[in-house]
Amino acid sequence: MNIWALPKDATIRVALLRLSGDHDLQELALDCDTERSRQAIRICHRRIPGLSAYLFTYAQPHGRYGLQLRYPTEAPGAAPPYGPLEEIDLERLTELLSMHFELT
C-alpha cells in the first residue's frame, strides 16, 4: 500500500507512515471508502471483526491527533463505551495503536 497516495491530509499520512515504520501492518486495513473526510481514517483489523480505531485530526491543535478505539465486544452500531482521546502527540498515538492492535 502506498500511504502517500491515500486521499488524506499529510498529518494522517505521517501517522500511518510512522506506524508502518515501527510495525508490520499486514493485519490492518484502511477504510478510505466510508470515511470521506481528508482529516480522518478508520483502521480495521483484518482478522478480528469489530476491532478498529478511528484516527482524526479535525478540531485538534496542530501536530495533535484524536483517536476513538472500538472493540469486538461492542454491539454493532452502538456508541463506544467512552469518548475519544484527544490532543495526542504522534509518539503516544503510535503507542496506543500498537497496544490496541497488538502489533509486533
Image (cartoon, helix red, strand yellow):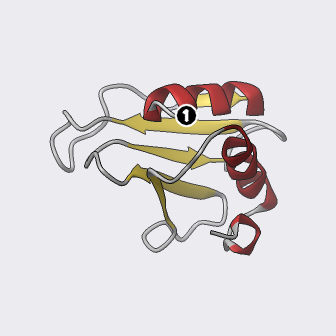
Q: Which residue is mark 1?
A: 97
The quadrant the C terminus occupies is top right
Can residue 22 be spotted in the picture?
yes
In-front residue for pair 46/56: 46
Measured as percent of width and height from the top left, residue 45 is found at 38, 49
Taking the image as shown, residue 29 lies to the left or right of residue 20, namely left
Q: Amino acid at mark 1?
A: Leu
Residue at x 65%, y 31% (from the top left corner): 93
For label 1, the crowd category at 10 Å Cα-Cα, with few meaning under 14, some 14 to 19 and many 20 or more, is some
Which percent across, then down, holds residue 81? 30, 27
Give the residue at the far right of this rendering: 62
Residue 42: x %, y % from top left: 48, 54
For mark 1, give the secondary structure: helix
Q: Is residue 52 above or below residue 82?
A: below
Is residue 89 at least partly visible in the picture?
no
Q: Is residue 10 above or below residue 89?
A: below
